[in-house]
């Protein structure tokens, strides 16, 4: 960890009592602080995260992952975070990727670093791979930015970039929204290879790929047609 | 004649309800005017069905009943769109409120530690 930079990890969590303690413990040595945003879980997620050493902000209503990321980012920025890392709570990300993610920002080369599971060997389930490839194409058409992985939750922002990207998509469409914001704000960005561990637990979390795809496409079409 | 009286009574009932809601400030004046216009036109068309044929002739649609169908469809789509916009705004307001509550609660907890 570079001591001159205050690196904050933002972890959105919903009913993650099984994994959150372990995830926080894995991430803590690689960052300055962690904020877990408990999105109104029904279990002991908040308690487990706090015991493991994280700051815990608790939504009194379930808003979704995008909203939780924005809340955590605002909390980290209010504590003078220089770099903000988004990290998933289900244990599919590897904390070992964090230094490589923050390094280009610390060196001032880019404003945002996005993790990509397609830049290294990852055992990605076939159906998920198909949907992810479709998402890459869709995001390219909508935002004009061609990436190798658009729906990877592991990413890092400089403090100033995080202030420019205001996530308004409360649920899963936030990943495409972030890329759209990067394109609009003309922020410097790069991709680095990261590890994604598809465990039975991580695969059991969240909605099906098909349902998620329809939701994301619907939201983006709606925004493009009426809100932009 | 029976159906015309029935439709008029229903329209007048809805108009009265709209007026009541306007008086209690549940709806705005603009919305009250819009609804009033809609139901007054509906009453006029019920008693003068030939009017729709004349409008159809001007718009080159064919039959008067078709004009009503098309206009109803446009109106329904417009209302759905308005409801969606309103829901979207409410969603954003709730998000801001929940976020503020969560952050204030956390700051309060930090200070009392």
Image: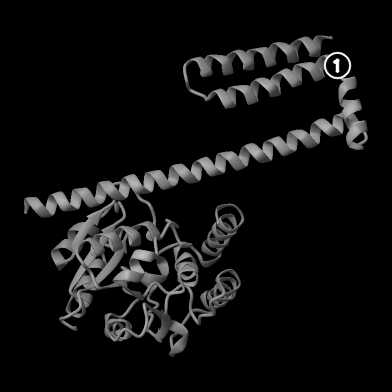
Q: Residue at x 56, y 43 (%)?
A: B84
Expressed as whole percent of the image width and height from the top left, the position of residue B101 reads 26, 46
Label 1 crowd bin: few (<14), some (14–19), many (20+), radius 10 Å:
few
Which residue is more in the foreground, A47 or A117? A117
Q: Is the C terminus of chain B in the top left, top right, bottom left or bottom right quadrant?
A: bottom left
Q: Toward the viewer: A139 or A36? A: A139
Residue topped by disc 1: B48
**Residue sitting at x 55%, y 70%:** A143
Q: Quadrant of residue A97?
A: bottom left
Q: Residue at x 44, y 90 (%)?
A: A121
> Viewed as shown, does residue A200 lie left or right of B99?
right
Q: Position of residue B47 (x, y in %)?
A: 83, 14
- Indicate the quadrant where residue A144 lies: bottom right
Secondary element under disc 1, as helix, strand or loop, is loop
> Residue lying farthest bottom?
A121
Do we see residue A44 in this rendering?
A: no
What colouring style does the render use? Answer: one colour
Tell me which corner region of the image, top left, top right, bottom left or bottom right, holds residue A115: bottom left
Nearer the observer, A47 or A39: A39
In the displayed structure, A39 sits above or below B69; it is below
- What chain does mark 1 sit on? B
Q: Give coordinates of residue B30: x percent, y percent.
A: 58, 26
Query: Is A83 on the left or on the right of B108, as rendered?
Result: right
């Amino acid at each position: 960890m570079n001591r001159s930079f205050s690196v904050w990890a933002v972890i959105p969590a919903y009913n993650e009592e099984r994994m959150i303690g372990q995830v926080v413990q894995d991430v803590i040595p690689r960052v300055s602080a962690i904020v877990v945003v408990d999105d109104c879980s029904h279990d002991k997620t908040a308690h487990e995260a706090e015991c493991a050493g994280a700051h815990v902000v608790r939504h009194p209503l379930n808003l979704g992952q995008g909203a939780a990321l924005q809340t955590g980012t605002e909390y980290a920025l209010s504590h003078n975070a220089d770099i903000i890392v988004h990290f998933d709570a289900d244990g599919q990300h590897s904390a070992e990727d964090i230094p490589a993610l923050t390094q280009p920002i610390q060196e001032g080369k880019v404003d945002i670093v996005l993790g990509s599971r397609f830049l290294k060997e990852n055992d990605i389930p076939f159906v998920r791979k198909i949907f992810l490839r479709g998402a890459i194409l869709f995001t390219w058409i909508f935002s004009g930015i061609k990436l190798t992985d658009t729906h990877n939750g592991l990413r890092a922002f400089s403090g100033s970039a995080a202030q420019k990207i205001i996530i308004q998509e409360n649920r899963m469409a936030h990943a495409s929204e972030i890329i759209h914001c990067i394109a609009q704000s003309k922020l410097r960005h790069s991709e680095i290879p990261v590890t994604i561990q598809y465990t039975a637990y991580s695969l059991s979390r969240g909605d099906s790929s098909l349902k998620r795809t329809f939701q994301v496409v619907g939201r983006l079409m709606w925004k493009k047609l009426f809100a932009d | 004649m029976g159906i015309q009286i029935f439709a008029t009574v229903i329209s007048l009932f809805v108009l009265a309800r709209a007026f009541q809601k306007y008086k209690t400030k549940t709806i705005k004046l603009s919305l009250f005017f819009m609804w009033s216009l809609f139901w007054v036109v509906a009453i006029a068309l019920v008693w003068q069905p030939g009017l729709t044929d004349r409008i159809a002739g001007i718009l080159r649609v064919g039959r008067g009943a078709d004009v009503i169908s098309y206009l109803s469809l446009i109106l329904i789509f417009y209302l759905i769109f308005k409801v969606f916009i309103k829901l979207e705004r409410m969603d954003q307001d709730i998000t801001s409120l929940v976020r503020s509550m969560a952050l204030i609660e956390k700051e309060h907890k930090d200070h009392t530690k």
